[in-house]
Image (cartoon, rainbow, N blue to C red):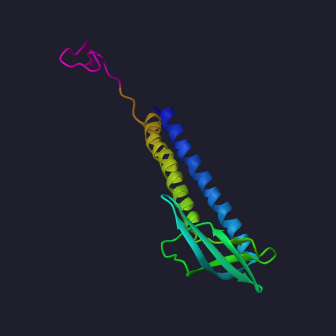
């Protein structure tokens, strides 16, 4: 049981750490892109909905040239045809843009913290509870006892077996 609990805790901790690393990478890439991009208002020119997806097409103007329609990589319930969204347009390649509300980064961060917290919490609780038993063996008082009788308790049955009674 201890081995399984260690494996589960290790898996939770590993998944949490991986998610936190992914959060850092996504955030770093987004901030790096923003550092060499300009903020531009893009117009929503079309929206089509299917049973599980909403496609949003935008058009924007940069340096006097119109780009689009281009597929936006996300959707918000506040969007509508004719509305605008702020996008970051790459200065060197204006057809390359990024739009992000930070929701993906927030979700990754929360999931990473939850998974790492569960895995780390299991390890921490096991370390704290295990240290008391080790301390007791190391610093506790030894008591000598005398076994007078060993028998089976036939009045009780656990998993088809009668438990031993030591007096």
Write the start and end of the magenta stretch as one range.
144-167
Nearer to me, 110 or 130: 110
Whether residue 142 is situated above or below residue 38 in the rendered picture? above
Quadrant of the image for the N terminus? top left
Q: Main SS type for the magenta part? A: loop
List x then y, in percent, for residue 36: 77, 76
**137 over 88 or under it: above or below:** above
Residue occupying image coordinates x 45% and y 34%:
137
Which residue sits furthest right? 92
Q: Is residue 149 visible?
A: no
Residue depicted at x 48% and y 50% = 118
- Which percent across, then down, holds residue 6? 52, 38
How far across and how far down the image is residue 34, in percent? Answer: 71, 75
Magenta stretch: includes residue 55: no
Percent from the top left, x then y, of residue 124? 49, 48
* Camera-nearest residue between 80 and 3: 80
Q: Is residue 41 left or right of residue 93?
A: left
Asked whether 103 or 93 is in front, the reply is 93
Q: Is residue 118 left or right of residue 160?
A: right
Lateral position of residue 160 relative to residue 130, left or right: left
Kindly give the residue lying farthest to the left in the view shown.
Answer: 155
Q: Nearer the viewer, residue 129 or 87?
A: 87
Q: Is residue 120 visible?
A: yes
The quarter of the image holding the C terminus is: top left
Counting labels gives 0
């Amino acid at each position: 049981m201890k081995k399984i609990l260690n494996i589960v805790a290790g898996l939770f901790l590993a998944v949490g750490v991986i998610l936190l690393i992914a959060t850092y990478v996504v955030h770093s890439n987004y901030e790096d892109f923003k550092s060499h991009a300009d903020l531009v208002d893009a117009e929503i020119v079309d929206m089509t909905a299917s049973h599980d997806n909403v496609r949003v097409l935008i058009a924007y103007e940069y340096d006097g040239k119109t780009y689009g329609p281009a597929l936006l990589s996300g959707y918000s319930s506040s969007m509508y045809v004719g509305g605008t969204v702020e996008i970051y347009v790459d200065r060197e390649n204006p057809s390359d843009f990024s739009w992000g509300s930070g929701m993906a980064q927030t979700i990754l961060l929360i999931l990473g913290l939850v998974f790492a917290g569960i895995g780390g919490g299991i390890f921490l609780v096991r370390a704290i509870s295990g240290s008391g038993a080790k301390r007791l063996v190391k610093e506790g008082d030894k008591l000598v006892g005398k076994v007078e009788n060993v028998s089976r308790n036939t009045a009780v049955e656990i998993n088809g077996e009668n438990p031993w009674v030591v007096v």
